[in-house]
Image (cartoon, rainbow, N blue to C red):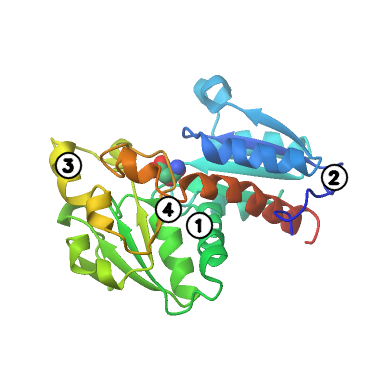
Amino acid sequence: EFKKSRPKALLRDKLLITLFFETSTRTRSSFEVAAKRLGASMVHLDPSKSSTTKGESLDDTFANLCAMEPDGVIIRHGFNATPQKLANKGLTPVINAGAGNYAHPTQALLDYFTIVEQFGDVRGKTIAIVGDIVSSRVASSGIRLFHRMGMRVILVAPKPFMPDNELEKVEHLDEIIDQVDVVMSLRAQLERHKAPIFEDYEEYAKEYCITKERFGDRDILLLHPGPVMRNIDISDEMLEDPRCKVLEQVRNGVFVRMAILKAILLDN
Ligand code: ASP
């Protein structure tokens, strides 16, 4: 509905605080645009300039923010459990904007929305997730959601990027490309690697970069959560291809986050 027509200022009296302990380009601005489109106000706390740097604990920082009576806190943190732990305090609604390598639920929802927009009924459709799956919270949340919605998920990665689980796995996309409806490409999460995994990402790209040669003229939807490492994750040429929905994902992210804010702040 929000995508079809510009909504009214449904959240005019609401105020949200963002608390991002890791960098963000799309997610934070997408939440802000979504909130403002619905008339809500936003306050951003930058932890690198807050009392966290003076030794205040996260729990105390959070309690102090909640004392100001926001209508919700949107948090990104490097630890998998942080958003849930803060939500369990019951002080204010907590929206997870990315937690460690475990969860990025709003990204999963916008990815799913983009797939549904293309296919309608997604049950039985196959998605291949390609790249650094083991360190990716986008993959973690996506896998849980896509399965739940009846999709087949195939993981495609070199061994060091492959998680240890029961899912279908292959090492090369070419092995299964004729079976897939959607490819989700992922960036190597260099900031989460304790030691460099590959010395030469150009070598890695020879196998894993999504190129026109690799896709051929197959009718496959190409997704990536961003930031895209050009010519390592996806080739320049493929980023311009109509099958590539990277910017449509960003566009849809605003509508999906509007729906999430409405559901949490108004309908709850
Ligand atoms: N932006 C996404 C995230 O925060 C994906 C990425 O950084 O590669 O997880």
Q: Residue furthest front?
A: 217
Q: Position of residue 176 (x, y in %)?
A: 23, 69
Q: CA distance from mark 1 to mark 3?
A: 27 Å
Residue 159 image label: none
Q: Position of residue 81 (x, y in %)?
A: 47, 52
Quadrant containing ligand 1: top left
Instruction: Read off the residue under disc 2.
Output: 9
Pair 1/3: label in front? 1
Does label 1 point to a residue whose CB lies under 8 Å from ligand 1? no
Q: Amino acid at mark 2?
A: Ala
Q: CA distance from mark 3 to mark 2?
A: 47 Å
Does label 3 point to a residue whose CB lies under 8 Å from ligand 1? no
Tell me the SS state at disc 1: helix
70 on left or right of 208? right
Instruction: Read off the residue under disc 1.
Output: 111
Q: Position of residue 96 (x, y in %)?
A: 56, 49
Quarter of the N terminus within the rendering: bottom right
Question: Is mark 4 in CB contact (under 8 Å) with mark 1?
Answer: yes
Q: Amino acid at mark 3?
A: Ile
Instruction: Read off the residue under disc 4.
Output: 138
Asked if residue 196 shows in the view, the reply is no
Residue at 46% x, 69% y: name it.
146
- Mark 3 or mark 4, which is nearer the start of the sequence? 4
